[in-house]
Amino acid sequence: MTALKSFFNWSGGKDSTLALYHILKDKNYSIEKLLTNVNSEHRRVSMHGVREELLELQAAAIGIPLQKLVLPDQPSMTGYEKYMMQTMNQLRQEGYTHSVFGDIFLEDLKTYRETQLAKVGMTGIFPIWKRDTVTLMHEFIDLGFKTIVVCVNEKHLDKSFCGRIIDENFIKDLPNNVDVCGENGEFHTFAFDGLVFKKPVAFRKGEIVYRKYAAPKEQNDNCFQTAPIDDYGFYFCDLLPA
């Protein structure tokens, strides 16, 4: 059987990394591209705030070609879908049939992704879907992966969590109401070493900055919410190439 030509929706974080690890072991799929949303104004990974240069170094260390979906700053749902569908149609013309995600349990988001993919005749694959997040986090650490927290939502975590390497102590320090994988958007990460990397990604920590955003009138899957939200703030740990 010929492996199905697939691309991976790559955030650069721990869930993406673990999902990539599992899908690379599945001989039914051939992962030939990483696709990442990048903010056109700040040249950073959408929501995570990671510099474009670090994203490129990360993809090079993995050894899979990177394609960037460059989006305007805080696009509307309509605008986001326009850019995304253009990219999906281009990938479909290149022979891609499957799109892989690191989602775990957000049902609405999974349904949204599958609906959008169906419009261009593609299928979504979710390697770590419905797995227990505590189990996933311990698996990630036990396999030797390394990741750093680059963004925290102030509604769930304080500034002290931003810039921390995730380890057993990090897990113990998380409040009880925070998902250990941050699946509800509590925090985002940058993975820099482990089994999917040919070499570690070299970086150094820069300053931690605070940004507050007006609650969007429309939601897209860069900041997908299942309920209305107020204005929200985030702490970002800037990473720089070493």
Image (spheres, helix red, strand yellow):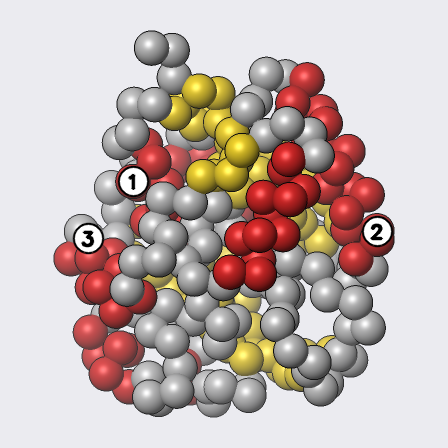
Which residue occupies 64% across, 58% down?
Answer: 221
Q: Which residue is mark 1?
A: 22
Q: How far across and how far down the image is residue 203, in percent?
A: 42, 55
Regarding mark 1 in the picture, which secondary structure is present there? helix
Closer to viewer: mark 1 or mark 3: 1
Q: Are marks 1 and 2 in contact (CB under 8 Å)?
A: no
Is 217 in front, or is 227?
227
Q: How many marks?
A: 3
Mark-to-mark CA distance, 1 and 3: 14 Å
Which residue occupies 78% across, 80% down?
Answer: 214
Image quarter of residue 88: top right
| In this picture, residue 85 sits left or right of residue 198 | right
Circle number at residue 88: none
Q: Which residue is mark 2?
A: 79
Which residue occupies 41% across, 58% down?
Answer: 104
Q: How far across and how far down the image is residue 74, in percent?
A: 77, 63
Is the residue 124 above or below the residue 31 in the image?
below
Q: How far across and how far down the image is residue 118, in percent?
A: 64, 35
Q: Which residue is mark 3?
A: 144
Can residue 52 be seen from the camera position used here?
no
Mark-to-mark CA distance, 2 and 3: 39 Å
Closer to viewer: mark 2 or mark 3: 2
Which residue occupies 33% across, 73% down?
Answer: 180
